[in-house]
Image (tube, rainbow, N blue to C red):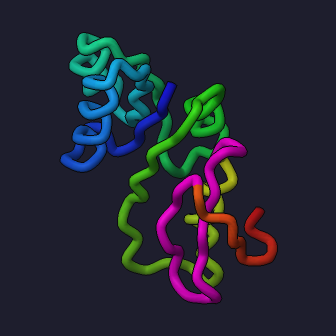
Amino acid sequence: MYAITGITGQVGSAVARKLLTENQSVRAVIRDANKGTTWAEQGCAVALADMNDANALKAAFADAEGVFVVLPPNFAPSLGFPETRAIAAARPGKVAVQVSGHSRPAAAHSDAQRFQPGLD
């Protein structure tokens, strides 16, 4: 099963549709229960989670083979990127977050094996 955030947007929905056409199980991770109906009708499991709620994200990502995360825009991040670190902390063990030095977070994917100290 793959947990998909941002599934109500263009990118997340494209990822979910691709997985569904390949007969993969999908869990739609959404903030608004009303928006989950469409995905449930397509065979997705639905989990409610806000990107600022690490416990809800951990529950939504539980038992997932993979997670697709679309981070919400943060045009004024705090020093050290604690908002992004909180989201990354909820990731399952198979998902790695790659960070370039002390700059902004880079892409997250299962092949990334480099971590900024203290992130993992």
Q: Residue furthest right?
A: 118
Residue 74: which quarter of the image? bottom left
69 within the magenta span = no
Q: Which residue is drawn at 43% across and 20% down?
A: 25
Q: Height in image: 96 above or below 117?
A: above
Instruction: Locate residue 97, reporting x and y percent.
Output: 61, 63
Q: Which residue is drawn at 64% across and 26% down?
A: 63
Instruction: Locate residue 18, reporting x and y percent.
Output: 27, 34
Q: Is residue 110 left or right of residue 39?
A: right
Q: Residue at x 25, y 24 (%)?
A: 21
Q: Is residue 14 left or right of residue 79?
A: left
Which residue is nearer to you in this view: 78 or 63? 63
Q: In this view, does 113 lie to the left or right of 98?
A: right
Residue 28: which quarter of the image? top left
Stretch in magenta: 91-110
Instruction: Locate residue 22, reporting x and y percent.
Output: 32, 25
